[in-house]
Amino acid sequence: MKDRLIPTLEKTIKRPTVLSPKPDSSLSHISAMSLYQRLARLFTRSRRIYFIKQSPKFLDLPLDILRLIFDQLPLHSNIIASRTCKTLRLLLHSKCSSATRKLSDDERLKVLAGLADVLPDHRLCTSCNALHIVDMDDTPSNLFLRYECQQFARLYDSLYFGICYTVRHYHVQLALKYARLGNVHQVYLRKLMESSSVASSGFYGMTVKFSVYPNIVDGRFILFTIWQFDEETVPLSLETLSRPAFRFCPHLGLVSKPNPRILRNPLIDVVYTAFKVANMGQDLHHSCGRCPTDYSITVHPGRVVFRIWQDLGPGATLADPCWRSHIWTDENDDFRGPTVFHQPGSIRDMYDRRTREFGQHRVRHLIDPKPIT
């Protein structure tokens, strides 16, 4: 048996080697490129794993240092930070929970305002003092919106113009927030900043036309409005303009039957002067001494045009004097309420500078809109 196996093994070992053909250069190039790609992917993956395993440098600081840093931040910033990672949650959660339980109503409202200023999908409701999901159909010119919160609105919540336009405080906050973020809800931002025009006839013998052009300038919400009164059945005069008790801020207005014992409103003298120079077609520019409002009056034959520029502020809380000074209430009228000083003409110049920078059309006259039917 052994004699028969040995010759067979020798034949197998001595079998001639078959030479493979020379590889093509193009195939070697492809093989080399695939090898390079595999090495690059392996290197990239190893770097990614390395960086993932590395802890952030900020969290490498001693806990005492981290506590000192977060002690300098407002409470709403601590609440946001406590929800970013496990380490900061362990460090800040108990502190934030303890602090929120001790807040007064005004302090809680301030914290909610800080959170609403950061969270893109939420807004602060001042009626129930809670955060609500933003309704993208809620705009100043939307008259048919049913509000989610059915509680009564708080004082100083809305700036009501009476003709199809109401600016609520959270409209200002949302517009400023989305303009600052620049990458979320920009379609809704454009809806909030849309211009609007409306007209109504038979208004105390006149046709009244209202137009509004909001803008954001230097982090502040500037509202430019135009009130145009045209003759219809009665000639225009100081008396006919005073019949509807027209006013565009809590401190400037026309009264149909003024009390001679009370100091006369400054707007009456301005309108009286405007009618005296009506044939000259001059724009009389003035400002309110109690709130950040600039305005002009132009009298044409059969037409009176009021142009008003108002600074509604940086979108802070309802306690912001700049916002509160624009709201007409029992606590803010001709003789009572906050006083916010501004340089006369500065708001108008701020608005005009913004429109020039962005090539927007400077509104001079009101384009006749379609009347309400």
Image (tube, helix red, strand yellow):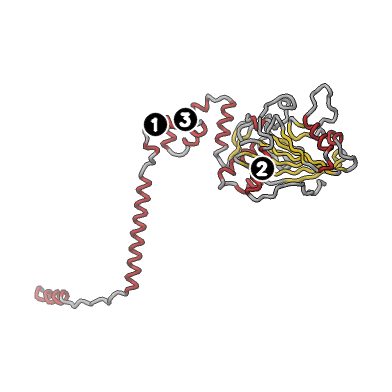
Q: Nearer the viewer, residue 300 or 33?
A: 300
Distance in Å between CA atoms under marks 1 and 2:
45 Å
Q: Residues within 10 Å of mark 1 (few under 14, many from 20)?
A: few
Residue appearing at x 68%, y 30% in the figure: 325
Specify the label residue 109 is tagged with.
none
Q: Position of residue 87 (x, y in %)?
A: 41, 36
Q: Position of residue 158 (x, y in %)?
A: 69, 34
Q: Based on the displayed image, in which of its 4 quarters is residue 298 positioned?
A: top right
Q: Label 1 amino acid?
A: Ile
Q: Label 3 amino acid?
A: Gln
Q: Based on the displayed image, in which of its 4 quarters is residue 27 positioned?
A: bottom left
Q: Label 2 amino acid?
A: Tyr
**Badge 2 or badge 3: first in the primary sequence:** 3
Mark 1 near mark 2, Cβ–Cβ under 8 Å?
Answer: no
**Badge 1 or badge 2: first in the primary sequence:** 1
Residue appearing at x 36%, y 45% in the figure: 53
Q: Secondary structure at mark 2?
A: helix
Distance in Å between CA atoms under marks 1 and 3:
11 Å
Specify the label residue 351 is tagged with.
2
Label 1 vs label 2, nearer the camera? 2
Mark 1 near mark 3, Cβ–Cβ under 8 Å?
Answer: no
Label 1, on which residue?
A: 65
Q: Nearer the viewer, residue 307 or 97?
A: 307
Residue appearing at x 79%, y 34% in the figure: 270
